[in-house]
Image (cartoon, rainbow, N blue to C red):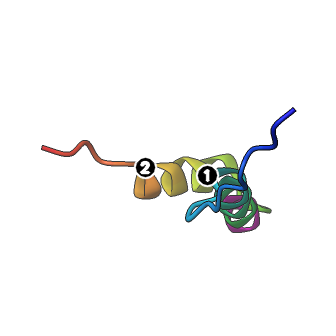
Amino acid sequence: MKTKDKITKDFDTVKTFREIKTKISSDIQGMTFEQLKEYLNRTKLKPQN
């Protein structure tokens, strides 16, 4: 059975997504519903033209 060569990754999707989720969680902690709606409107992605 052959072993595969280890592939080095330049970008770790799981690590990056976890960091983003942690930042968002700390940003919205303790917000009211109205503050949360404003935060989401302020930070949502804009379509590229």
In the image shown, does 18 or 12 lie closer to the viewer? 12
In the rendered image, residue 42, in percent from the top left (x then y), is placed at: 42, 58
Q: Is residue 17 above or below residue 4?
A: below
Judging by the rendered image, the residue that carries numbered circle 2 is 44
Furthest-front residue in this view = 1
As drawn, is 42 to the left or to the right of 1? left
In the rendered image, residue 35, in percent from the top left (x then y), is placed at: 60, 56
How far is mark 2 from mark 1, CA to CA?
12 Å
In the rendered image, residue 48, in percent from the top left (x then y), is placed at: 20, 45
Magenta stretch, overall SS: helix
- Looking at the image, which residue is at 66% across and 53% down? 17
Is 6 magenta? The answer is: no
Q: Is residue 44 above or below residue 29?
A: above
Judging by the rendered image, the residue that carries numbered circle 1 is 36
Numbered label tally: 2
In the rendered image, residue 8, in percent from the top left (x then y), is placed at: 64, 62
As drawn, is 47 to the left or to the right of 29? left
Residue 28, by quadrant, is bottom right
Label 2 with label 1: CB-CB less than 8 Å: no
Q: Secondary structure at mark 1?
A: helix
As drawn, is 5 to the left or to the right of 39? right
Q: Amino acid at mark 2?
A: Lys
In the rendered structure, which segment of residues is drawn in magenta?
24-28
Quadrant showing the N terminus: top right
Residue 6, by quadrant, is bottom right
Q: Residues within 10 Å of mark 1 (few under 14, many from 20)?
A: some
In the image shown, does 10 or 31 lie closer to the viewer? 10
Is 27 magenta? The answer is: yes
Dot 2 or dot 1, earlier in sequence:
1
Q: Secondary structure at mark 2?
A: loop
Quadrant showing the C terminus: top left
